[in-house]
Amino acid sequence: MKSETSTPTGEFTLRLSATRRGARLARLLAVQQLQDWGVRGSAADSAALVVAELANNAVQHGRVPGRDFEVRMERADDHVHIELSDARGARRPQPRPEPDEGGYGLLLVAALATAWGVKGRCVGKTVWAVVRT
């Protein structure tokens, strides 16, 4: 199930199934939206990687059977604000200080974003990040 909204004000919202395919599709459609906004080069690569990592985390750690996850991006003059919401509020993401096999996703997000964090929702949580353009 997919619904998509893109407006000239620089807002993009996408709801996808919490599956590997949904996570992959989130990244591909985010890349297309970034191109449509004229975000290119390393800024586009960084934003796409942040979406990919957060979508992967939502599918692996935030998945609730039968519930979707949502990607939201807002384009501003000098940055893209990325939000990824899932239905599992109890599992808050925390970067691992010394990842073994896996666990690098939030370290990448922290390295690529100027800021990131987690906020609660009525159902679930939202992980957000800001990437400079």
Image (tube, grey):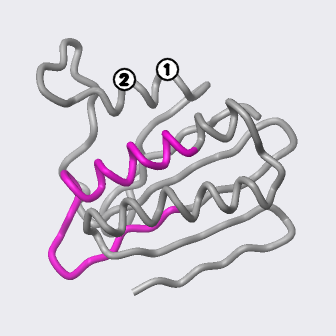
Give residue 111's mark. Answer: 1
In the visual, does 128 lie left or right of 41? left
Q: Magenta stretch: residue 132 in it?
A: no
Residue found at x 45% / y 56%: 84
Q: Amino acid at mark 1?
A: Ala
Q: Quadrant of residue 58?
A: bottom left
Residue found at x 61% / y 25%: 114
Label 2 SS? helix
Give residue 80's mark. Answer: none
Residue at the disc numbered 2: 107
Which quarter of the figure is the C terminus placed in?
top right
The answer to which of 105 and 25 lies nearer the viewer is 25
Q: At which x and y percent is residue 117?
A: 45, 36
Which quarter of the figure is the N terminus placed in?
bottom left
The magenta segment is: 48-71
Q: Quadrant of residue 5?
A: bottom right
Residue found at x 30% / y 62%: 124
Q: Residues within 10 Å of mark 2 (few under 14, many from 20)?
A: some
Residue found at x 47% / y 62%: 26
Label 1 SS? helix
Q: At which x and y percent is residue 27?
A: 49, 56
In the visual, does 122 lie left or right of 39? left
| Disc 1 + disc 2, Cβ < 8 Å | yes
Q: Magenta stretch: residue 58 in it?
A: yes
The answer to which of 122 and 113 lies nearer the viewer is 113
Q: At which x and y percent is residue 42?
A: 68, 30
Q: At which x and y percent is residue 15?
A: 46, 75
Q: Amino acid at mark 2?
A: Leu
In the visual, does 16 lie left or right of 43? left
